[in-house]
Image (spheres, rainbow, N blue to C red):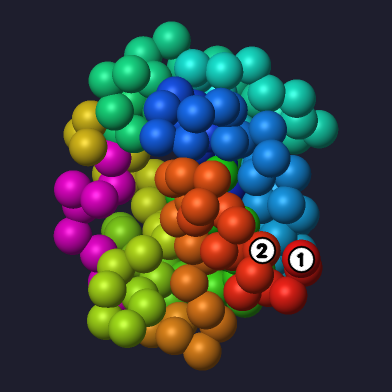
Amino acid sequence: MSAMVAAVVLAAGASTRFGSPKQQLLLAPVLTRVRRATSIDDIVVVLGAHDVETDARAIRCPDWDRGPGASLRCGLAGLPPDAEAAVVVLADGPALSPEAINRVVAAWLDGDSDVVAASYDGNRGHPVVVGRRIWARVPDEGARALEPTLVPCDDLGSPGDVNTPADLAGRVRESGAE
């Protein structure tokens, strides 16, 4: 029997550098990629600063402005009781690889670490798997404050990090979707 693994998509931020709710543009493509991952059994989207239309189950986090950890804790609290781990995904990473999700989940299943993160060029990135045993220990800084086992995903490409309209334009050019 395999473990039940859910995805928590963090989409609660204010998007101040972007100038408008970037989640409205980026959430649907990120969800499409999460749904392509064969290792995910459930998905919850955490909203906060903005109301964003989504076809996924959404949870509003009233404490979103305390930091990504507060949003993550809201998402974790909304997962089914049989979820053994959560894959943390950012709504502003439009190039997320479904295979990166599968790879970090497989490493979590095969290993003994409660936190497993994808790495790109040796740098920690997303997605990040957080085992249920440590959900109660997620600080306001989020999973970034937890020491992970790194799983190289260089061959899959970084999910990106869209903070400004220029970041988004650069992503579109890179993907050839102009």
* Residue 45, quarter of picture: top right
> Relative to 171, does residue 100 appear above or below in the rendering?
below
List the residue tagged with mark 2.
172
Left or right: residue 30 versus residue 141 is right
Assess disc 1: are there few (<14), some (14-19) or many (≥20) residues with their C-alpha within 10 Å of its C-alpha.
few
Residue reaching furthest top?
62
Amino acid carrying label 2: it is Val
Residue 55: which quarter of the image?
top right
Residue 148 is covered by the magenta coloring: yes
Q: Tell me: residue 161, above or below residue 155.
A: above
* Sequence order check, earlier mark of 2 and 1: 2
Determine whether, in the image, residue 114 is placed left or right of residue 7: left
Question: Going 30% across and 58% down the picture, which residue do you hit?
Answer: 114
Magenta-tinted stretch: 142-150
Task: Give the residue type at disc 1.
Answer: Glu
- Could one spot residue 53 in this view of the protein? yes
x and y percentages locating residue 63 in the rendered image: 36, 14
- Disc 2 and disc 1 in contact, CB within 8 angstroms: yes
> In percent of the image, x 58 and y 28: which residue is there?
21
Residue extending farthest to the bottom is 155
The mark total stands at: 2
Q: Which residue is mark 1?
A: 178
Q: CA distance from mark 2 to mark 1?
A: 6 Å
Residue 57 at x, y percent in the picture: 71, 29
Residue 59, image x and y in percent?
59, 21
What residue is rendered at 44% in x and 85% in y?
Answer: 154
Q: Estimate how packed mark 2 is, as few (under 14), some (14 to 19) or many (20 or more) residues with alpha carbons within 10 Å.
A: some
